[in-house]
């Protein structure tokens, strides 16, 4: 099921609100990611100032915005990042969890302002992202 224009706007607005409330949410996103998947933290040993984490979150959000809009590059970006992450030993199923972690972190940041409607829109978005990840992983013979 594709996102409606209203759902796309809800997602965009939620991202904007997170930026207003938390500024850079990268530390929160990665704290959650490392708590859930501690095996990922050693991959960031050289990222002492958090710039790589911030860049990765920005790329993920750029991907989200492209999926909400023209869809001109998100599948290619996902495929490229699947390949890059595979080189670091990150399988597609773990790569896919990042987007869920972003959603859960954003929900926590917004608290009561994260509505059931917002959650439903993000659930649909995550399903679309998972489908793209599976399609790209399958296309390039990556074990999910």
Image (spheres, rainbow, N blue to C red):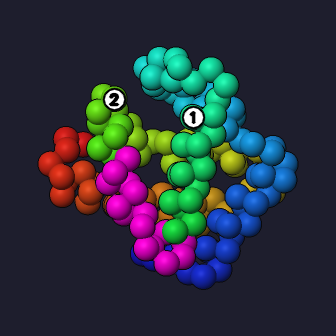
Q: Is residue 107 above or below residue 94?
A: below
Q: Which residue is mark 2?
A: 88
Counting residues from the N terminus, which is met first, the one under dot 1 or under dot 2?
1
Q: Name the residue: 34% across, 29% down.
A: 88
Question: Overall secondary structure of the magenta stretch?
Answer: helix
**Which part of the image, by quadrant, shows the C terminus?**
top left
As drawn, the label of residue 52 is 1
Residue 126 on the magenta segment: no
Mark pair 1, 2: CA separation: 14 Å
Over which residues does the magenta segment extend? Answer: 67-81
Tell me if 94 is positioned left or right of 31 in this view.
left
Report helix, strand or loop for mark 2. Answer: loop
Crowding near the residue tagged with mark 2, few <14, some 14–19, many ≥20 C-alpha atoms within 10 Å: few
Tell me if 75 is positioned left or right of 139 in this view.
right
Query: Is any part of residue 41 visible from this angle?
Result: no
**Which part of the image, by quadrant, shows the N terminus?**
bottom left
Q: Position of residue 101 (x, y in %)?
A: 56, 41
Q: Position of residue 102 (x, y in %)?
A: 59, 46
Q: Name the residue: 53% across, 20% down.
A: 46
Crowding near the residue tagged with mark 1, few <14, some 14–19, many ≥20 C-alpha atoms within 10 Å: some
Q: Is residue 68 above or below residue 57?
A: below
Q: Name the residue: 58% across, 55% down.
A: 61
Q: Quadrant of residue 142?
A: top left
């Amino acid at each position: 099921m594709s996102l409606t224009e209203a759902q796309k706007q809800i997602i965009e607005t939620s991202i904007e609100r997170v930026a207003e409330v938390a500024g850079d949410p990268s530390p929160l996103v990665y704290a959650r990611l490392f708590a859930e998947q501690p095996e990922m933290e050693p991959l960031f040993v050289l990222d002492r100032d958090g710039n790589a984490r911030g860049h990765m979150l920005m790329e993920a959000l750029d991907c989200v915005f492209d999926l909400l809009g023209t869809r001109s590059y998100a599948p290619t970006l996902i495929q490229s990042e699947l390949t890059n992450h595979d080189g670091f030993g990150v399988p597609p199923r773990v790569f896919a969890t990042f987007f869920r972690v972003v959603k859960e972190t954003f929900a926590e940041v917004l608290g009561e302002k994260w509505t059931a409607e917002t959650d439903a829109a993000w659930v649909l978005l995550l399903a679309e992202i998972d489908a793209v990840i599976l399609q790209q992983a399958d296309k390039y013979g990556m074990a999910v």
